Image: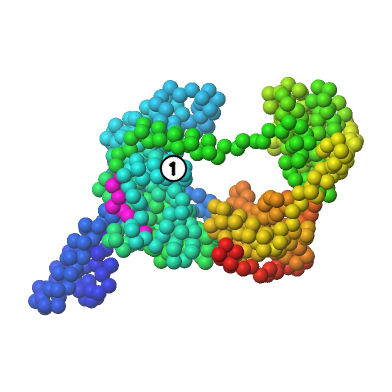
Amino acid sequence: MTNYDLLNLIGEAREEYVFDAIKTKTGVLQQKKRLTLNRIGLIAAIIALLLLLVGCVAVYLRLQDMSIGKETYAESYNNQGLAIEPTEGIRDIVTWGGHSGDPIQLALKEWYEFLETYDTNGALKEQFLESETIDFPEQYYHTYHCYTKEMADKLEEIARKYDLKLLDSPLILQRYQENLFWESTGLVSILIPEANVEIAHLSGEIYAPSNFNLDLDLKLKNEEIGLYGEYYYFSKDNLHNGGWSKIDLSKVSQWGYTTVSGTPVLLALSNKGSAYILAEQDQASILIEIDGNLSISDYPQPEDIITKEQLEQIADAFDYTIAPLPIDSTILKTKLDETEAAYQAAHAYVPEQHGSFTEYLMQNKGLGSSQTTQYAFYDLTGDGVEELLLGSNGAYTTWLTMKNGKVISTSINDTYLCEDGIQEEVLQFSVFSNYEQHTYMAPISDSAVASLDIPCEVITCLTYKGDAWYQGPSRSTFDRTPISDEEAQAIMEKYTRIELNWYPISEYPIDDQGRTLGDYALENDDRPSAAELRKIYANLVKDIEHTEYTHYLIIDINEDGRDDLCLSQNGETIYDIYSYSHGEVYGLASGEYYPCEENVMEYCDIVNMFGGVEKVEHLYFRFGARGLEPIAYIAYNKATASWERDREGTPITEAEAMAVMERYPRISVGFHPIEELIG
């Protein structure tokens, strides 16, 4: 900062004093004037302010101080996501943890420039991924993403040149291991005691001896706003792996701010909601990155972004004087491994063992009451013993086989049995998309079942998308070629489906006395009173980890004669739905749904496509025999400012889109505060 810049920043100086000072600075000799007491006081104030600013210039940084270069880019969408004629923009390559030509910034600049010209076609990386051979210190791969010895040698050369140490491999810290972070660093918190922000969850990576990256779920206490943040502690002794970001600084607001605890920090907030808090210590740099975009759109509007005041409130909450102890990676790794093993053992899924098909089916006490599920027997594996198939409308979605006296269950998409043991798996999305896929698979071998290697070998796969058929060797979109309608039809006719003998699941016999699965379902169909059911649902909410529920509603949402629990996070939309049947609570639906007339649920989502295109989807469902079943779809394409009727982008008029919305208008269902349920 020059004295001229300083004078431009002083708002209290009278214009003639500033003008005098500027002319003196530029070499124009001024006539000597006698100083008044007021002017002496003003000059003293200016000198004091200059000294203060000189002392803080290393703290009140700018992102420009962290730039190691620039690049141009094409901007093809405006702030609303509308496609525009591409315009050229400029991005800075910003290094984190290094600035103003210090050793870390110079080292990162040299490393960046090396990587920009190294293995530009990716051949060496592909070779490494195929061989998986590491002939250099392993931490260089895990921490700095080196994949050749040449890269590792260059990294060591740069570190030596700038007298920086290289970090160990990262130690992964899960949420349930948070206490080990505090223990290993000797810290109690990264927040000040009176912080108005709380950390709901903490996880991340630790790089011995002194660097760490933390993932934070933050909550502003006064405003009930939840945010995601990342906290980086960069020791100035180490070449860190924080890397660099490419930022168009013309779209970022920056300002210096002194926190309530007296720490000067740099705050930055982009027009997309990316927020940064930067602070300097003698021994380290601290970067806190906040996702300040409160929407799920890549094109947030001003009201969707946290304010400068909210960012300052977050900055006030952190303690920038922390001094973590050097981390002993060997000790910490041992403790992390021990706690991970204990956690996995406590939360390991142990599947129930069933000695017969009947025992397996009876685990679901309500299965026998299903009006759609059917069963059939067929020898899928060719070992002379029939498997049990469960499904509906001629297709099976689950099949059961016996091995070593135990039931093995396999769940699949709708699958039809064809001649010679061929299986045809069918995917079809007639409402959302003009799409279907037919995958033909070789017969299941008995040896595959014995080794639990159940997936079958794909013979061929037909995909219909848009208005054309494609054929390929797998379900993948790669390596498939267009074929004619006639060719596709000929392939499907080649694999003739077999008609199996299907029976209602309620008629499945469970004993020699003639009892059926339907009888068993009736025997176990308890019907708690409204008060008892309310208590069951209250206990469920208390046990659920999700603490963000604010409202609830108990209503028969799927019209099956049983009251369901609808949970909301805002009193307007339904996030999760639970039901109760045959002594068990189970999930009925999950997602954010707007209740509509005629028992319809609208799911509204923002989908980010390739290349920056963003669509707002409106998917309409109604509860049916198989749960939520799609009935209508429309989408608004922001890039073209037009409406579409399917995911292939088939255009419709705005009037047609509005007609769908008017057909299923949103309604208020009368949520109640969650406190009324859980007390």
> Which quadrant of the structure image shows residue 86?
bottom right
Residue 493 visible in this rendered orientation of the protein: no
Residue at x 14% of width, y 78% of height: 38
Magenta-drawn stretch contains 483: no
Numbered range of the magenta stretch: 317-324
Q: Nearer the viewer, residue 528 or 250?
A: 528
**Element under label 1?**
helix
Q: Is 345 above or below relative to 632? A: above
Residue at x 26% of width, y 53% of height: 58
Q: Quadrant of the C terminus?
A: bottom right
Residue 383: image location, x then y, percent: 81, 22
Q: Amino acid at mark 1?
A: Gln
Query: What secondary structure characterizes most of the magenta part?
Result: loop
Residue 457: image location, x then y, percent: 74, 27
* Residue highlighted by disc 1: 177
- Tell me: 198 left or right of 664: left
Residue at x 26% of width, y 56% of height: 57
Q: How many marks overall?
A: 1
Residue at x 16% of width, y 70% of height: 43
- Tell me: 167 left or right of 80: left
Q: Nearer the viewer, residue 294 or 110?
A: 294
